[in-house]
Image (cartoon, grey):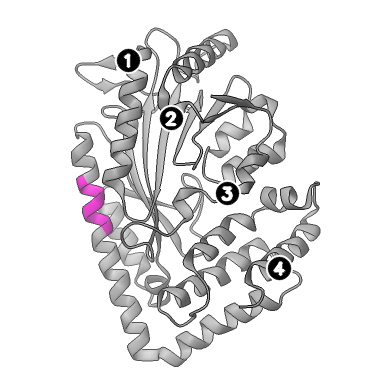
Amino acid sequence: MKNKKEVDGLMSHTGEWLRSKGMHPDIVMSSRIRLARNMKDIPFPNKAKKKDLYEILSLVEQAANEINYFADSNYFKISELDNVDRQLLVERHLMSHEHATNPDGKALIVSPEEIVSVMVNEEDHLRIQVMHSGFNLDETWDIANTIDNALSEKLSFAYSFHWGYLTSCPTNTGTAIRGSGMLHLPALVMTKQINKVLAAVAKLNFASRGFYGEGTQASGNFYQISNQVSLGHSEQEVIQNINGLIRQIIEQEEQARQALLVQNKPMLEDKIFRSFGVLKAAHIISSQETVELLSMVRLGVDLNVIKDVSREAINELFIMIQPAHLQKFEGKKLTAAERDSKRASVIRQKLGGI
């Protein structure tokens, strides 16, 4: 692994999960598998002392250095990063807000294409995360399982034959797997069917969250759908269940999109082109307005209403217009007003000439 004290190298490429590949990339932006693991005989992070946290850091770093998969990965000690770099890692969905907020005794491993990230000493000793573009949970699980097996050969995980993997939060106990899909559902929102869909999701004991997961509200018509518990279910059952639910939501979103095209195509096209026009012309624009407008442009690309923009380019903009990314582009800290101006400039450059 490469020990890093800055994240600038991540700015030179696009994370694989944004590349609009896999099945149904028009509706499913990304698929994610997350595994929670803790070390045997060491207090979990919420009860651990500083020496315990640093013991975990040492054990994980040594183990990862002996695993071929991590040979080209970056290793970040969170306490060595400044606030902007920490926030950038959150914006790229590589770690949680909690991991960034309390950095002492924490680390992050990131694979070259940002497919794999491992949070060390977040809520659990290890949070192994794998993300892929599109609707691709099966391959995502295969990678997560391979990494989990490799780490389990080097580390002793806390496991009970009765309860399964032991975790800080009881809802993660068992297989400790969380499968999720990031879904773009603008047609269900516009046809006012989204609340019915989300109610059904909750009734089936699944969770729906915003673009940045737990504790965030939906924005840009993005919803992260995931299982809530893993106890009593095998990994295959969890993945099969979330796959089935996502397929149903995809079908409903496709039907809603067709209904909009059939029943009120002029209104839909007008909304899409107005959104595109504002993004191309604005010189000051907020993050919230940008996300809502990008959502409509993305829908326009999906429906072939807008023909000269790639979905990948729009996906990238959802990340590029976030505060830490804007400050990295500018090379200095920016006020909120300066970020609104820089955001508009970045969008105009990205969409320029289209």
In front: label 2 or label 3: 3
| In-front residue for pair 119/171 | 119
Q: Position of residue 117 (x, y in %)?
A: 47, 35
Name the image quarter holding the C terminus: bottom right
Q: Earlier in the sequence, mark 4 or mark 2?
A: 2
The image position of residue 20, as x and y in percent, is: 42, 60
Q: Which residue corresponds to mark 4?
A: 285
The span shown in magenta is 240-246
Dot 3 and dot 4 residues touching (CB under 8 Å):
no
The Cα–Cα distance between marks 3 and 4, rounded to whole angstroms, is: 25 Å
- The residue at the point 41 percent across, 89 percent down is 265
Q: Quadrant of residue 151?
A: top left
First in residue order: circle 3 vs circle 1: 3
Mark 4 residue element: loop
Identify the disc placed on residue 13: 3
- What residue lies at 49% left-to-right and 19% top-to-bottom? 45
Badge 1: few (under 14), some or many (20 or more) residues near its Cα, within 10 Å? few
Decide if residue 119 is in sight here: yes
Image position of 69 (left or right of 277): left
